[in-house]
Image (spheres, helix red, strand yellow):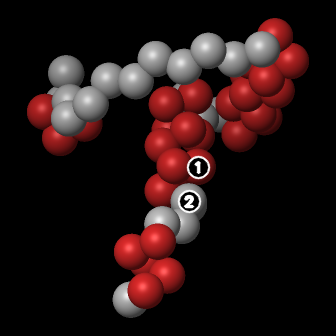
Amino acid sequence: MNKKWAAKRLTINLTSSEAQKLEQYCLMTGRPATDVIRELVRSLSTQEEKVS
C-alpha cells in the first residue's frame, strides 16, 4: 500500500440505492469509488476555511 494514502482507513455504510448510485457513477467515469469519495471529502468546506 502506498504510504502516502495510508493515513486513515474509513468504513462507511451505504443504503442499497446510495451504493448503486456510487457504482453507476464510477462505471460512467471509470474512476474507483475511493477516488470519488476522497474528492467529495476534499470539496467539503470547513469553519477554518471560511475564516481564512
Disc 2 element = loop
Q: Could you tell me which residue is drawn at 58 percent across and 40 percent down?
A: 36
Amino acid carrying label 1: it is Leu
Answer yes or no: do the residues labelled 1 and 2 have beta carbons within 8 Å?
yes
Q: Could you tell me which residue is drawn at 54 percent across and 67 percent down?
A: 45
User: In the image as oriented, which residue stretches furthest toward the bottom?
Assistant: 52
Q: CA distance from mark 1 to mark 2?
A: 7 Å
Q: Nearer the viewer, mark 1 or mark 2?
A: 2
Q: In the drawing, does residue 33 fall left or right of residue 22?
A: left
Q: Could you tell me which residue is drawn at 73 percent across and 27 percent down?
A: 22
Q: Could you tell me which residue is drawn at 40 percent across and 24 percent down?
A: 10
Q: Which disc is residue 20 wearing?
A: none
Crowding at label 2, few (<14), some or many (≥20) Cα neighbours within 10 Å?
few
Q: Nearer the viewer, residue 28 or 10?
A: 10
Compared to 5, does 39 lie above or below? below
Q: Which disc is residue 44 wearing?
A: 2
Amino acid carrying label 2: it is Leu
Residue 13 picture quarter: top right
Q: Quadrant of the C terminus?
A: bottom left
Q: Which disc is residue 40 wearing?
A: 1
Crowding at label 1, few (<14), some or many (≥20) Cα neighbours within 10 Å?
few
User: In the image as oriented, which residue stretches furthest toward the right?
Assistant: 17
